[in-house]
Image (cartoon, grey):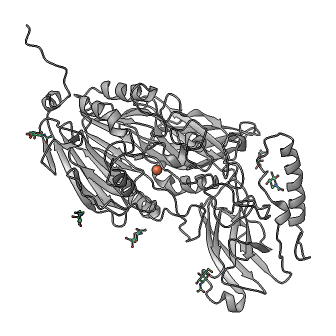
Amino acid sequence: MFQGSGLKGMILPVILLFLATLQEASSHGDNPLAGIAIHEARFALEESAFIKASPGVLGAQGGNPEWVTLSFTSANPSNDDWIGVFSPANFSAAICDSEGSMAGAPFLCTAPIKFQYANYSSPRYKDTGKGSLRLLLINQRSDFSFALFSGGLSKPKLVAVSNKVTFANPNAPLYPRLAQGKTWNEMTVTWTSGYGISSAEPFIEWGQKGDVRVRSPAGTLTIDRSSMCGPPARTVGWRDPGFIHTSFLKELWPNTVYTYKLGHKLFNGTYIWSPEYQFKASPYPGQDSVQRVVIFGDMGKDEPDGSNVYNNYQHGALNTTKQLIDDLKNIDIVFHIGDIVYANGYISQWDQFTAQVAPITSKVPYMVASGNHERDWPGSGSFYGTKDSGGECGVMAETMFYVPAENRAKFWYSTDYGMFRFCVADTEHDWREGTEQYEFIERCFASADRRKQPWLIFIAHRVLGYSSASWYGAQGSFEEPMGRESLQKLWQKYKVDIAFYGHVHNYERTCPIYQNICLDKEKHNYKGPFNGTIHVVAGGGGSGLADFTPLNTTWSLFKDHDYGFTKLTAFDHSNLLFEYKKSSDGKVYDSFTINRDYRDILACSVDNCSPTTLAS
Ligand SMILES: *[C@@H]1O[C@H](CO)[C@@H](O)[C@H](O)[C@H]1NC(C)=O
Ligand SMILES: *[C@@H]1O[C@H](CO)[C@@H](O)[C@H](O)[C@H]1NC(C)=O
Ligand SMILES: *[C@@H]1O[C@H](CO)[C@@H](O)[C@H](O)[C@H]1NC(C)=O
Ligand SMILES: *[C@@H]1O[C@H](CO)[C@@H](O)[C@H](O)[C@H]1NC(C)=O
Ligand SMILES: *[C@@H]1O[C@H](CO)[C@@H](O)[C@H](O)[C@H]1NC(C)=O
Ligand SMILES: *[C@@H]1O[C@H](CO)[C@@H](O)[C@H](O)[C@H]1NC(C)=O
Ligand SMILES: [Fe+2]
């Protein structure tokens, strides 16, 4: 059963505790640990092997993330030896079967937060048996340990476990995420901490820059394993996501700079504070001023120290994040339109993602849409029965990010930003005529006062309009089935300027189009009355790039097989600039403008005005 005799202190108690948990869980009938093959555990702890981590305490000066240096030795070194990062530190290393379709090696009962080959920074490790490695850790509310494994990722054998490493305050309030509230003058702040409602009161202390501070209370949500729909989220991928707090900052003065701090008042009277952040309140709907919006999908996360995580295929993510941070003073609001984290049921990655984007989300509203990797799970009410959410079935996305939806489980909403009206759909729920969502989309378009909000934008994750993705091309539809058939009459009737999609990991732009026909020969400077909606695929945020079909269509004006994002700049009610930028250099590779007066929006074209009468 167990190989090797040198079981070091901590492991055996862990296994016993683990068995006790297993028994307790099975008495509930629904046993989330049922798939764990404890009898297959392999331990090969070597007396002479060791792994040591320093420093033992991180973030004593408030730093996060922080570097840890590992040094390690093995008597039987090999090039496929690897090091896993575990948190909490008292992990179980028992080997499990692969769990669920998204799971991959390394096959362990507890998913490592991340992992790296032992030879990564020590090319001579195989010969010398000695190595060192530097890893970047983020505060995730618990301690860490590092384990050296032999046997590669597919048959891991535990060789040595390190000392524990912890952040000075593991519970600290972290990763603030701004989002527009339900009204134009409300900003919401969502953050993560280790303080539940029985240990502290969460709040935001805020005010106009340099003015008096007020405190607004925050609500607290938690997520437990039983709210996950299946593996790996419910099994090996589960990790306690901590406490998620949201506070509503109301009655903001438009365009005003506010500073804020996340706070927790412990019940013994001690206050815990985050650093101070600042944001600029949103403009009044219709306000004439320069307004800049960034839109992209499918970004995901990547590890800056080069280590691996499960679902490690978003290698453009850090470049996109960097470009946005570098240009943040020229960005007012961000839309990440689905496939947000690609945690796919490995819950710790939500921390990794919120840490990655915190420099953005703490300063400008970060509005998300729901994608297949947030929501889809068989038998869970998603429109598609795939397992793309890895068992999360929407719960993580709906809790970790605020959106001003009536019901966050139905992820559609509208939001206004000055001269823009955004109607954000949820393609993981039915959108066809006659559904609740279709009614919402029509109401959102119809209620935009185009004199005040001339720029009407439709957003959805899957391509409901037009895309030359290889798989859509092969189907001959160039869209998600039933996409434009259901919605094109609404886009045309309500003169939607631009429709944005993700899901397809590349960039593409169409002509102004209706019913598959280009209604405008112009390619860059659209002037005068509306002819048709322009469709943009902006799914190159970071996830592995998607190929285009070799078929060329008349409507596709620009394609780019690279990582990138798009930006809208409204200069005033008559002038809009669209830009596509690459994530590698932040430069503009495609652009167009729309110039028009209000009468051009009122003017009639194909299928968008009610019939006129000659009667007087
Ligand atoms: C590990 O430690 C945490 C507290 O840090 C505790 O809640 C948990 O039960 C422990 N797990 C095991 C398997 O000992
Ligand atoms: C390190 O190990 C990996 C995985 O086994 C291997 O692909 C790589 O070639 C090794 N690097 C060196 C420098 O030996
Ligand atoms: C209150 O509790 C915190 C956390 O347990 C502790 O660090 C702090 O010293 C306590 N403060 C007082 C005044 O007892
Ligand atoms: C719409 O088409 C008409 C006729 O071709 C053209 O004059 C007009 O400029 C077009 N509108 C836009 C916004 O391009
Ligand atoms: C489609 O257009 C691209 C770019 O202009 C060209 O390289 C390709 O050969 C065209 N494909 C077909 C089938 O005509
Ligand atoms: C990220 O940007 C750098 C610098 O421009 C570039 O060399 C690299 O190829 C980019 N990475 C990806 C995955 O595109
Ligand atoms: Fe997707």
The residue at 57%/38% (across/down) is 204
Q: Quadrant of residue 438?
A: top left
Task: Give x and y (percent) for residue 482.
Answer: 38, 38
Please indicate, yes or no, whether residue 417 appears anywhere in the rendered image.
Answer: no
The residue at 48%/50% (across/down) is 339
* Ligand 1 found in image quarter: bottom right
In the image, 486: left or right of 612?
A: right
Image vertical order of residue 110 relative to residue 434, above or below: below
Image vertical order of residue 498 relative to residue 468, above or below: above
Task: Give x and y (percent) for residue 10.
Answer: 87, 66
Image vertical order of residue 67 relative to residue 459, above or below: below
The residue at 60%/64% (across/down) is 309
Of residues 22 and 141, the one nearer the viewer is: 22
Number of numbered tags placed on the structure image: 0
Q: Quadrant of residue 581?
A: bottom left
Q: Quadrant of the C terminus?
A: top left
Task: Give x and y (percent) for residue 518.
Answer: 18, 44
**Residue that extends furthest to the right in the rendered view of this protein:** 5
Q: Quadrant of the N terminus?
A: bottom right
Image vertical order of residue 613 relative to residue 366, above or below: above
Of residues 401 and 75, the one nearer the viewer is: 75
